[in-house]
């Protein structure tokens, strides 16, 4: 039984910072990749950042230079450090994890990030 649990969301003023955390439980393997997606009202869900087990990263153009994704010391944990937040960053942020060999992916319940102007 695999679960992804996010934390760290909240309300912050424009220009501020937040750090999101995601931890997987119930796993007996290491995910090939983990990442963060977000969805704002009326918009499609989009990839924010992703990181592989080897440490390779990629980011949406809209967050490059402001957000940093990293893996933690604990197995199957991932963080998203967000700086210089803008109102446009307001969305529900979802943790995602993939195990390519099994062809499966998992999603967290989401955590709300709200950036006030």
Image (tube, rainbow, N blue to C red):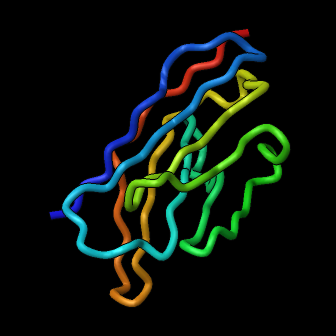
Residue 99 shown left or right of residue 20 in the figure: left
Residue 81 screen position, x and y as percent: 64, 37
Q: Quadrant of the N terminus?
A: bottom left
> Residue sitting at 31 percent across and 75 percent down?
29
> Residue sitting at 50 percent across and 40 percent down?
93
Residue 71 shown left or right of residue 30 in the figure: right
How many marks the image carries: the answer is 0
- Quadrant of the rendered structure where residue 111 is? top left
The residue at the far front in this view is 73
The residue at the far left in this view is 1
Q: Quadrant of the C terminus?
A: top right
Please say if 76 is above or below 103: above
> Residue sitting at 57 percent across and 36 percent down?
40
Q: Compare residues 31 and 115 and report the one nearer the observer.
A: 31
Please say if 66 is above or below 13: below
Q: Compare residues 40 and 101 and report the one nearer the observer.
A: 101
- Quadrant of the rendered structure where residue 86 is? top right
The residue at the far bottom in this view is 101
Residue 10 screen position, x and y as percent: 49, 19
Residue 80 screen position, x and y as percent: 59, 42
Residue 101 shown left or right of residue 35 in the figure: left
> Residue sitting at 46 percent across and 40 percent down?
21
Q: Compare residues 92 and 95 and report the one nearer the observer.
A: 95
Residue 39 screen position, x and y as percent: 54, 42
Residue 106 shown left or right of residue 81 in the figure: left
């Amino acid at each position: 039984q695999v679960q992804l649990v996010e934390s760290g969301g909240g309300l912050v003023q424009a220009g501020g910072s937040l750090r999101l955390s995601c931890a997987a439980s119930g796993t007996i393997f290491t995910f090939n990749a983990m990442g963060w997606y977000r969805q704002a009202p009326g918009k499609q869900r989009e990839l924010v950042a992703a990181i592989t087990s080897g440490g390779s990263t990629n980011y949406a153009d809209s967050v490059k230079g402001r957000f940093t994704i990293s893996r933690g010391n604990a197995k199957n944990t991932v963080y998203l450090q967000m700086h210089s937040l803008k109102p446009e960053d307001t969305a529900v942020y979802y943790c995602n994890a993939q195990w390519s060999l099994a062809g499966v992916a998992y999603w967290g319940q989401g955590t709300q990030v709200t950036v006030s102007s």
